[in-house]
Amino acid sequence: MAVEIVLLTPVLMAFVILIVMFGRYVAVRGDVDATARDAARAASFENSLPAARQAAAATVRASLDKETTCADIEVNGPFEAGGEVTVVLHCRVSFDGLGLIGVPGSVAVEGSSTVPLDPYRSFA
């Protein structure tokens, strides 16, 4: 009985750590998707595409934690009345942010969101 416990304990602990890691990965993906949604909404309130890009970038900086960095923030779409604005985030999350403390490296996470623009508003 003691030999079985000694052999199974590391396997069970590795399984628990794997479950925690995958759970954290799903949470980080949700955070990136929520940030893309918030950035698209912030961009939709602006009157020009450059201002929309600045608003989206400010929202991304304020929303994500220090382990998640988004180097590429795309703001696309016809910025006109009745159009849509789409924000696409290309982020990297360090393994520290996934619960793997001390493990080097990172993983890529993407998120996107599209928001319709008000058809009765004037744009610059």
Image (tube, grey):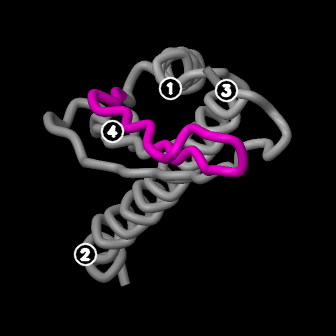
Residues rendered magenta in the picture: 69-87
Residue under pointer 2: 7
Position in image of residue 13 (x %, y %): 38, 62
Sooner in the amino-acid sequence: mark 4 or mark 1:
1
Position in image of residue 72 (x %, y %): 29, 33
Q: Residues within 10 Å of mark 2 (few under 14, many from 20)?
A: few
Closer to the camera in the image, 122 or 5: 122
Residue under pointer 4: 91
- The amino acid type found where label 3 is placed reads Phe
- Classify 52 as above or below 73: above
Dominant secondary structure of the magenta stretch? strand
The CA span between labels 4 and 1 is: 22 Å
Magenta segment includes 57? no
Mark 2 near mark 4, Cβ–Cβ under 8 Å?
A: no
The CA span between labels 2 and 4 is: 39 Å
The CA span between labels 1 and 2 is: 60 Å
The tag on residue 123 is: 3
The CA span between labels 2 and 3 is: 67 Å
- Classify 85 as above or below 47: below
Sooner in the amino-acid sequence: mark 2 or mark 3:
2
* Residue drawn at the location 42% of the way across and 46% of the way down: 88
Front position among marks 1 and 2: 1
Residue under pointer 1: 49
Which quadrant: the N terminus? Answer: bottom left
- The amino acid type found where label 4 is placed reads Cys
Closer to the camera in the image, 80 or 75: 80
* Residue drawn at the location 57% of the way across and 44% of the way down: 85
- The amino acid type found where label 2 is placed reads Leu
Front position among marks 2 and 3: 3
Mark 3 near mark 4, Cβ–Cβ under 8 Å?
A: no
Front position among marks 1 and 3: 3
